[in-house]
């Protein structure tokens, strides 16, 4: 959380994260060049660099695509999500290096404009075996550029999180284009099945993790709470909400996070204003609901970030009757204070 | 096909060139006009916004010329519902 923009909001965790990333990529590229020169002694250094940066970018894209569903399935992966935007920008820079080297190597020597040459050098668009795969990589790189260049919080705030997220969902289009780029390109000239098997494993991982995460999310949203005559809906027994944590319930087309803390219950819209992270999967830290993705904080009774910050989320009326928690599905405007429901008596704590 | 590709490449290059010129002006003069968090921001922030402003310059130009003082409010089911009368 910040009142003014900075280029990169460095902190200790981000520095560790980025150091591991830089070290891993350096090691990967060095090993790729070493092994590549041993397996393909006739390959030029330019070719090894093009392949090395291309495979590193594609591998990192798989990691990036797997982090989201992994974090949905198991909270232990949440730290990887924290700095995923740095992974995305790094992946774009690797892909850009691959693209620039390829254009210089294959399209900059003739009379044709190098960009036009990408589309015109091979015109066998009707052939599957000889399909011009480079335009696919070009369009994928354009999408990755759009995503990397809008990754800063300035864009998140100015496009608003829902629009920003839809823009960044284009990563799946880029992934599809890159799978076709690799399948119609590198795989066509490859005699060993290793690359094809690795690509198959990568696609299977991405697909299966997304399906598993989607199934888990669907189960949460399918739970239909019972509605009482006064409009309040029953959410759960008080003891089902762990202390300083939340239970989520789908109400009014979106999830509501119902928190228990200090003998009280408050309900907020589950959608963090920063990057639409799931507030209900966060905890109450220092008296504030804390988003598990990037640590944005909100006061539980009013859904507003503590001053001087300005983020706000809608709030809901709550009530506790006979040990059961009820929430009214009509939200109040973001930042509106709602009197928390008091819990009478002791609550048997559940292990988290 | 050759003509279509050349038109595409020309339009693409022209769009990015115009966008880059706009982006430089925007980060110097425009960012603080459309976003209250931009005044007082670092030089690094302004440099890092240039590629995105180059890509999305029509959007920023429209907002800048309309004199919008702050980003639009977020819309989702709860926020929309909270603003409707019962």
Image (spheres, grey):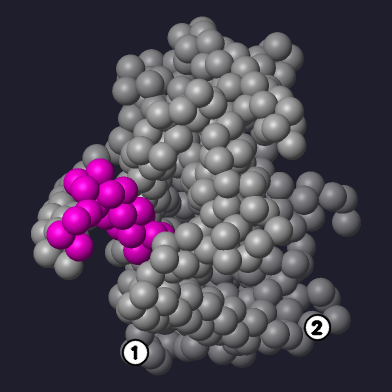
Query: For residue A231, what is the image quadrant?
Result: bottom right
Marks 2,1: beta carbons within 8 A = no
Q: Nearer the viewer, residue A141 or A21?
A: A141
- The mark closer to the camera, 2 or 1, is 1
Cα separation, mark 2 vs mark 1, equals: 30 Å
Secondary-structure class at tag 1: loop
- What's the residue at 46%, 28% (across, down)? A110
Q: Position of residue A342 (x, y in %)?
A: 53, 72
* Crowd class of label 1 (few under 14; some 14 to 19; many from 20; radius 10 Å): few
Q: Which of the marked residues, 2 or 1, is nearer the chain's N terminus? A: 2
Q: Is residue A300 left or right of residue A90?
A: right
Q: Nearer the viewer, residue A42 or B31?
A: A42
Q: Where are the magenta residues, as a range?
A: A40-61
Q: Nearer the viewer, residue A102 or B27?
A: A102
Q: Main secondary structure of the magenta part?
A: helix
Q: Quadrant of the C terminus of chain A?
A: bottom left
Q: Is residue A344 visible?
A: no
Q: Is residue A94 above or below residue A62?
A: above
Q: Position of residue B35 (x, y in %)?
A: 55, 23
Q: Chain of mark 1?
A: A
Disc number placed over residue A310 in the picture, else none: none
Secondary-structure class at tag 2: loop
Q: Is residue B55 visible?
A: yes
Q: Nearer the viewer, residue A342 or A289?
A: A289
In the picture of the structure, the residue carrying the numbered disc 1 is A351
In the picture of the structure, the residue carrying the numbered disc 2 is A228
Q: Is residue A64 above or below residue A196?
A: above
Q: Position of residue A225 (x, y in %)?
A: 72, 85
Total number of numbered labels? 2
């Amino acid at each position: 959380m910040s009142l003014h923009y900075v280029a990169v909001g460095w902190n200790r965790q981000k520095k560790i994260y980025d150091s591991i990333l830089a070290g891993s990529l350096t090691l990967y590229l060095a090993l790729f060049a070493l092994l590549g020169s041993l397996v393909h002694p006739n390959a030029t250094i330019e070719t090894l660099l093009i392949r090395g940066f291309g495979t590193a970018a594609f591998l990192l894209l798989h990691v990036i695509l797997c982090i989201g569903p992994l974090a949905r399935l198991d909270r232990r992966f949440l730290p990887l999500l924290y700095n995923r935007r740095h992974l995305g920008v790094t992946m774009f820079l690797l892909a850009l290096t691959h693209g620039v080297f390829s254009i210089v190597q294959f399209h900059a020597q003739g009379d044709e404009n190098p960009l036009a040459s990408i589309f015109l050098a091979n015109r066998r668009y009707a052939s599957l075996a000889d399909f011009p795969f480079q335009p696919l990589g070009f369009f994928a790189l354009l999408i990755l550029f759009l995503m990397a260049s809008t990754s800063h919080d300035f864009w998140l705030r100015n496009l608003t999180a829902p629009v920003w997220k839809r823009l960044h969902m284009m990563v799946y289009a880029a992934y599809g284009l890159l799978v076709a780029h690799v399948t119609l390109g590198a795989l066509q000239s490859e005699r060993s099945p290793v690359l094809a098997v690795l690509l198959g494993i990568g696609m299977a991982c991405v697909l299966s993790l997304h399906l598993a995460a989607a199934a888990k999310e669907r189960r949460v949203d399918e739970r239909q709470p019972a509605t009482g005559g006064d409009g309040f809906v029953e959410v759960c027994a008080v003891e089902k909400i762990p202390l300083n944590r939340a239970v989520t319930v789908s109400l009014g087309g979106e999830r509501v996070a119902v928190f228990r803390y200090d003998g009280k219950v408050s309900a907020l819209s589950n959608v963090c204003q920063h990057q639409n992270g799931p507030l209900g999967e966060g905890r109450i830290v220092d008296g504030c609901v804390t988003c598990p993705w990037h640590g944005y904080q909100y006061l539980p009774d009013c859904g507003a970030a503590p001053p001087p910050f300005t983020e706000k989320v809608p709030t809901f009326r709550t009530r506790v009757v006979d040990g059961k928690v009820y929430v009214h599905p009509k939200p109040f405007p973001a930042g509106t204070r709602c009197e928390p429901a008091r819990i009478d008596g002791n609550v048997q704590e559940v292990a988290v | 096909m050759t003509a279509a590709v050349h038109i595409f490449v020309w339009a693409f290059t022209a769009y990015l060139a115009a966008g880059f010129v706009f982006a430089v002006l925007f980060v110097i003069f425009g960012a603080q006009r459309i976003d209250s968090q931009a005044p007082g921001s670092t030089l690094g922030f302004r440099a890092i916004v240039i590629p995105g402003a180059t890509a999305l310059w029509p959007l920023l130009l429209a907002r800048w010329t309309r004199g919008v003082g702050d980003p639009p409010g977020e819309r989702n089911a709860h926020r929309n519902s909270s603003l409707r009368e019962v």
